[in-house]
Amino acid sequence: ISLVLVGVIFWSTLGLLRESVSMSLAAVPTDVNIEAVRTYLQSLPGVLAFHDLHIWSMSTTETALTVHLVMPQGHPGDAFLLQVQDELREYHSIEHPTIQIETSVDLGCKLAAENAV
């Protein structure tokens, strides 16, 4: 009977173990479709490109995102940022986005390289 109980306990906590390992590795949460987030960011008005995109779990219920948006026309204002935050929360389950606006492609952000982390 005790082996059956151990098996039940192990089976019921296996999901928690996977989630804990994923959080400790700062992996993209399984409920976030990273390709959909990329498509969304690229489709934003005024966004020429984006880089340094990171998505990770802050807890079991909160997901964070950081990204650099290249917008040559200039900073679009707070209303744009609030709209992006709302849409990331509603459509992609990302509750804590941090967005950096860059206006020049020519200056070259050091974090824009493909191999940069």
Image: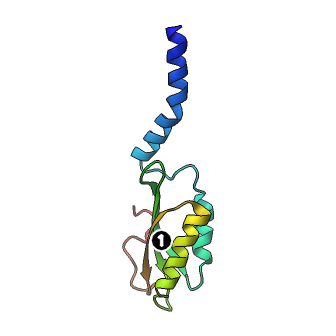
Q: Could you tell me which residue is drawn at 55 percent across and 20 percent down? A: 8
Q: Residues within 10 Å of mark 1 (few under 14, many from 20)?
A: some
Q: Is residue 9 above or below residue 34?
A: above
Residue reaching furthest to the left: 110
- Between 117 and 94, the one lying in front of the other is 94
Q: Is residue 94 above or below residue 5?
A: below
Residue reaching furthest to the bottom: 73
Q: Split into 4 quadrants, where in the image is the C terminus?
A: bottom left
Q: Position of residue 104 (x, y in %)?
A: 43, 87
Q: Position of residue 2 (x, y in %)?
A: 49, 9
Quarter of the image where one finds residue 110: bottom left
SS of the residue at dot 1? strand
Residue designated by label 1: 51
Q: Is residue 109 left or right of residue 41?
A: left
Q: Could you tell me which residue is drawn at 49 percent across and 36 percent down? A: 16
Q: Position of residue 24 (x, y in %)?
A: 39, 45
